Amino acid sequence: MPTPDSPTPAHHTQAHDTPGHDTPGHDTATAPTLLTGALTGKALADQVTRDVKADLRAWTFRPHLVSVLASGDPASRVYVDSKARRAERLGVQFTARDLGDTLTDAALHATLDELSADPGVHGIMLELPLAPGLDADAALLRLAPRKDVEGLSPANLALIAAGREAEALLPPTPRSIRFLLRAALGDDLRGLNIAVIGPGRTVGRPLTFMLNNRGATVTLCNEHTRDLGRVLAGVDAVVVAVGRAGLLRPEHVQPHHVVIDAGINVQPGGVVGDALPDLPVRAQSPVPGGVGPLTSALMYQNLVRAVKLQRGEAVE
């Protein structure tokens, strides 16, 4: 499992790729223990949380994180409540700004401009999706890049696409996926073939660049890809993030595959992923309990990094 001391190719300079620190570990003579079976994010999440708490204890102030809601989406409200509970446990000041679902683009932009300019606000999250009629692309442009703790502003995504991850705040969900892939496939992803199903803004698109930055060969698919089993047959790992329950089924996978499921689908019996559970593969992340716990922890690690950037402190 990747740790702050995990081996990483010496010539790689991408930041953010260890749970506890923002720089890769040094080469070592020992090979990592590769995980099989259920790929859960809890152990890595616990490690990240310990490091975040240590950083927070070193400061004499409480960082202020603001979540902006601009929709009536019930799932978004559930996520905001979950973030608030974690913030309280960590000692982070948390504010939810619920703007309702009838506001205009101009009103949303004014709120984001205000928060971006406020020195007492250290991190901003714009909860997606927005209410119908609101322009998410235009709204994300209003976020100060160094306060964009979810890494979705065009400035942060451009840095990722340019291979300049050390200067960016990385989206936590793609970063969580990359950690789990390294836990199952090894720290060095160079030359591996990885399929990403779902070219979405928050997961698939940034993840494609982040995997490419690590030397992986990426096949980008979507829910309309024909003959999916044939397309996936030769890859080493499959990441699915579409938001369609049961999209990935036994006929699509091979025994050697590692499957990372980032889908979230709320059903009467609970939350399920995009892949059917217990696929006949070498390793698979469960939903819930796989990507999610680590994603939440990494978002607060981004807050720590954002505060350091804003204060002019050294970051690795």
Image (cartoon, rainbow, N blue to C red):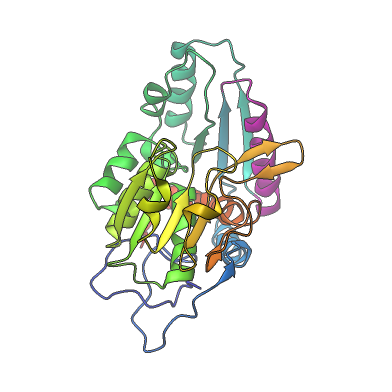
Quadrant of the rendered image containing residue 314: bottom left
Quadrant of the rendered image containing residue 278: bottom right
Q: Is residue 299 magenta?
A: no
Residue 187 in the image, given as x and y percentages of width and height: 39, 72
Give the dominant element type of the magenta stretch: helix, strand or loop: helix
Task: Determine whether 38 is above or below 86 in the image.
Answer: below
Q: Which residue is depicted at the point 43% across and 76% down? A: 6
- Per the rendered image, the range of residues in magenta is 70-91
Quadrant where the C terminus sits is bottom left
* Residue placed most toward the observer, 99 or 247: 247
Residue 209 in the image, given as x and y percentages of width and height: 30, 49
Task: Determine whether 226 is above or below 8 in the image.
Answer: above
Task: Determine whether 298 is above or below 142 in the image.
Answer: below
Which residue lies most toward the bottom here?
Answer: 29
Residue 34 in the image, given as x and y percentages of width and height: 49, 76
* Residue placed most toward the observer, 163 or 49: 163
Q: Is residue 311 visible to us here? A: no
Residue 282 falls left or right of residue 8? right
Residue 255 falls left or right of residue 267? left
Q: Which residue is depicted at the point 38% across and 40% down? A: 226
Residue 155 falls left or right of residue 101? left
Residue 238 falls left or right of residue 217? right
